[in-house]
């Protein structure tokens, strides 16, 4: 077989996609038209593992983007619950605590980001020459 075991073919690409969309390995293999044994064997191949990791990372990134799009609605919900006179006091306290906690974390992350940027700039500064 020409190129056997060396080429990342469309079946393997389909297997990567199936692993992300199907409930389990059996269903993924069935969706691609291969045996579970073949799928398990492919999953041991570094090239397949790399493609699967990249596909998982891309899928996760898309999910995070969707979460970020929903943050405005989430904040609105928290604030609405927090100020609603009909909301039980314990729920108001949990909502207020959540707002404060997330706000504090945001400030911490901004501070860390600024410190890292400062360190990166310091590392990139030209070093004085010992010969001068």
Image: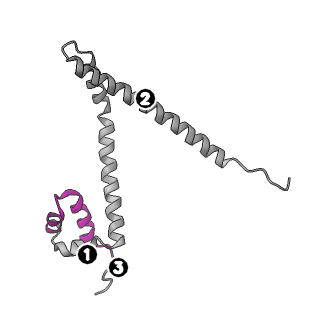
Which numbered disc, 1 or 3, marks the residue closer to the eye?
A: 1
Quadrant of the drawing holding the N terminus: bottom left
Where residue 4 appears, as percent x and y from the top left, is: 30, 83
Residue 28 is situated, as x and y percent measured from the top left of the image, at: 18, 64
127, above or below 14, in the image: above
Name the front one of labels 2 and 3.
Answer: 2
Q: Which residue is the extreme one toward the front?
A: 90
Residue 41's disc number:
1
Q: Which mark is residue 120?
A: none
* Near-viewer residue (22 or 7): 22
Q: Which residue is mark 3?
A: 6
Q: Is residue 61 left or right of residue 38?
A: right
- Nearer to the camera, 130 or 69: 130
* Residue displayed at 35% across by 79% down: 6
The mark nearer the N terminus, 1 or 3, is 3
Q: Which one is earlier in the sequence, the residue at label 1 or at label 2?
A: 1
From the image, tell me which residue sits under label 2.
Answer: 104
Dot 2 or dot 3: first in sequence order is 3
Residue, x 31% and y 63% (percent of image)? 52
Stretch in magenta: 7-30
Decide whether residue 8 is among the magenta residues. Answer: yes
């Amino acid at each position: 077989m020409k190129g056997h075991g060396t080429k990342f073919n469309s079946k393997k690409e389909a297997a990567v996609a199936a692993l992300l969309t199907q409930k389990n390995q059996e269903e993924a293999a069935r969706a691609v038209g291969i045996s579970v044994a073949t799928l398990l064997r492919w999953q041991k191949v570094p090239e397949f593992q790399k493609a699967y990791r990249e596909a998982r990372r891309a899928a996760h990134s898309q999910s995070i983007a969707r979460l970020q799009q929903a943050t405005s609605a989430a904040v609105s919900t928290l604030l609405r619950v927090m100020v609603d006179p009909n909301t039980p006091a314990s729920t108001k306290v949990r909502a207020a605590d959540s707002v404060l906690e997330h706000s504090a974390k945001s400030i911490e992350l901004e501070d860390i980001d600024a410190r890292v940027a400062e360190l990166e700039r310091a590392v990139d500064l030209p070093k004085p020459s010992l010969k001068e």
